[in-house]
Amino acid sequence: MRADVVIVGGGCTGASTAFWLASVHRQRVVLVERGQVGAGPTAYTSGIVRMHYSYDPLIRLAVRSLETFRRFDEIVGGPADFRVTGFLILAPRGQESTLAANVRMQRRLGVETSLLTPSEVSAIDGRLRTDDVGAGAYEPRSGYADGYATTTAFAAAARRHGADIRESTPVLRLLADRGRITGVETSRGRIDAGAVLVAAGPWTPSLLAPLDVRIPIRATRHQVAVLEAPAGTSPLSPVLVDLVTGLYTRPDVERQFLMGSVEESPEEEVDANAFNAGADFAFVERMSARLQQRVPAFAGAAVRRGYASVYDVTPDWQPILGAVPGVDRVFVAAGFSGHGFKLSPAIGEAMASIMTTGRFDPIDLTPFRYTRFEEGALIHSPYAHGIVG
């Protein structure tokens, strides 16, 4: 068969791009996924949707994505299960000016956010200990969504607009002739195409290596614990990112909440096809101690379960977006380093536009080009935690 575009990878980015390509640009799209749509790393995302970044293009992507999440059923036609909880970030003493500068930039770009003193942080939730906090920032319109629901809704909408969604269809190799992509070979046969987008997360490097395209992406294991607040208490209402302790929390159903780390290290580089998908006792113990440091009332929180998934991590913890050199009409959207889900609505919209028109006027994505690593043009966050952006 013949397609205008083949998308390799059925996570949130691939499904979003398929939707925008089919619905807006009227492209003949085939999305191929080795397993089930939305069942890879996307299924294990914490789903946090926030706009707090320190880099102009990331803020713009986050703002655009939030508006899609807030109107998801209207725009896409399906549920993302977006919940508005507010988003609170805490910075340590000595980083007040950095946080203030970022808040000013965000407000200039349309983010509804405010800078908070430690006492104002306490006013959001009096259980928060703030004696080691320099400042905070709060976004009332942010929250979280469901990764699986979002991705399957994008895929279903793409299918309604004519896209062909093929699950349980591993891509065996990308096909090229005289420096131009010609299609893909899958476990179910060949698909000819005028363009290919590789949005396969940690599997992206192995797919591109036979074309002599070397993508600097590592697969690293990251853990999440699900806790239950002690009897008579409730989870923190807002999503919390605590740069003092390196902790994040996110409310879930009833008294349960998610807990994880925003630290870049210690990391565990793994094989994305074979890793421990459970949570380590040492991780849960370490993060529970940090949780109790921030919220002493959670000293009796019970651990209900834990799990681990993989991030596709680049050297600067920022994605690779756009065409790759060497083979014409091959594009990449990968290397999101743990913060791709919240950006996926806008990333899909942008990639669809770039692949069909060569540009995306609302946001300049050239800083995320493949060649930035060899050019020494890495994107550096002012925060010690690169995942925060």
Image (cartoon, rainbow, N blue to C red):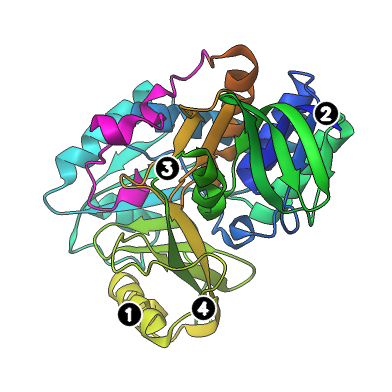
Report helix, strand or loop for mark 4: loop
Point 26% across, 29% down: residue: 375
Q: Which mark is residue 2?
A: 2
User: Mark 3 and mark 1: span between their CA atoms?
Assistant: 36 Å
Seen in the image, is 72 located left or right of residue 259?
right
Observer-side mark, 2 or 4, equals: 2
Observer-side mark, 2 or 1, equals: 2
Q: Which mark is residue 276?
A: 4
Front residue of 67/179: it is 179
Point 53% across, 64% down: residue: 272
What's the residue type where badge 1 is placed?
Answer: Arg
- Residue 112 in which image quadrant: top left
What's the residue type where badge 4 is placed?
Answer: Asn
Point 38% across, 44% down: residue: 138
What's the residue type where badge 2 is placed?
Answer: Arg
Front residue of 152/68: it is 152
List x then y, in percent, for residue 279.
48, 79
Q: Which numbered disc, 2 or 1, marks the residue that appears first in the sequence?
A: 2
List x then y, in percent, for residue 214.
42, 42
Asked if the residue at tag 4 contacts the one at tag 2, i.e. Cβ–Cβ closer than 8 Å, the answer is no
Circle 1 residue: 286
Observer-side mark, 4 or 1, equals: 4
- Residue 330 in which image quadrant: top right
Residue stretch in magenta: 361-389
Circle 3 residue: 214
User: Mark 3 and mark 2: span between their CA atoms?
Assistant: 27 Å
Is 158 part of what is drawn in magenta?
no
